[in-house]
Amino acid sequence: MKAAANKIVSLLYTLKENNEQGPVIQVTPEDKPLVFIFGVGQLLPEFERNINGLGKGEKYAFSLKSSDGYGEKDPEAIVDVDKNIFVIDGKLAEDILIVGKSIGMRNDQGQPMTAVVLEIKEDTVKLDFNHPMAGKDLHFSGEILDVRDATPEELDHGHVHGPGGHQH
Ligand SMILES: [Zn+2]
């Protein structure tokens, strides 16, 4: 069976920044492969395009331009926020305000977002809400471990059941 729309694909991957020689950003542990429904928007479209048609045991390696990855950095996603929002019980949360650290925030609609602290100033904190991999070329390599048909229930729920997925 080959990776295609509505198949459940299990794979291992190594993500490197820029190219094959770049620093390793992410590696799936051998016992915790990525398991997903192919073709329903769970992964980057260009990632799926590159592994389309591969079967169990096949290896892959390819690069993606940042525009096909997590997009370009948006200057408007870098904002200065009032330092007071980090005051908890009258005390500045210095343990989370560390340059380079990712912090969990919520937007106006209450949805979770992640921001990286760029700079801590007198009254404000400069935060970068861009995806950490925005503006970077990506290199993926790995192996397809398994491909199977999705059950009607999995397609209905929009996620994988069983090993590597939801247990219910
Ligand atoms: Zn479910």
Image: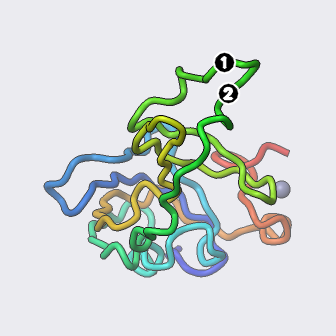
- For badge 1, the amino acid type reads Lys
Count every numbered label the image shows and give the total.
2
74 sits left or right of 106 in the view: left
Residue that carries the numbered disc 2 in the rendered image? 87
Q: Give the residue at the far front of this rendering.
A: 122
In this view, 137 is above or below 122: below
User: Are the two marked residues, 1 and 2, in contact with CB atoms closer than 8 angstroms?
Assistant: yes
Rendered residue at 72%/24% (across/down): 88
In this view, 164 is above or below 17: above
Residue 70 percent across, percent down from the top left: 44, 68
Q: Is the distance from the Cβ of mark 2 to the nearest ligand 1 atom less than 8 Å? A: no
In this view, 67 is above or below 61: below
Residue 112 percent across, percent down from the top left: 70, 50
Residue that carries the numbered disc 1 in the rendered image? 91
- For badge 2, the amino acid type reads Val
Quadrant in which residue 152 is drawn? bottom right
Q: Is mark 1 on a helix, strand or loop?
A: strand
Rendered residue at 51%/30% (across/down): 97
Rendered residue at 43%/44% (across/down): 28
Q: Is mark 2 on a helix, strand or loop?
A: strand
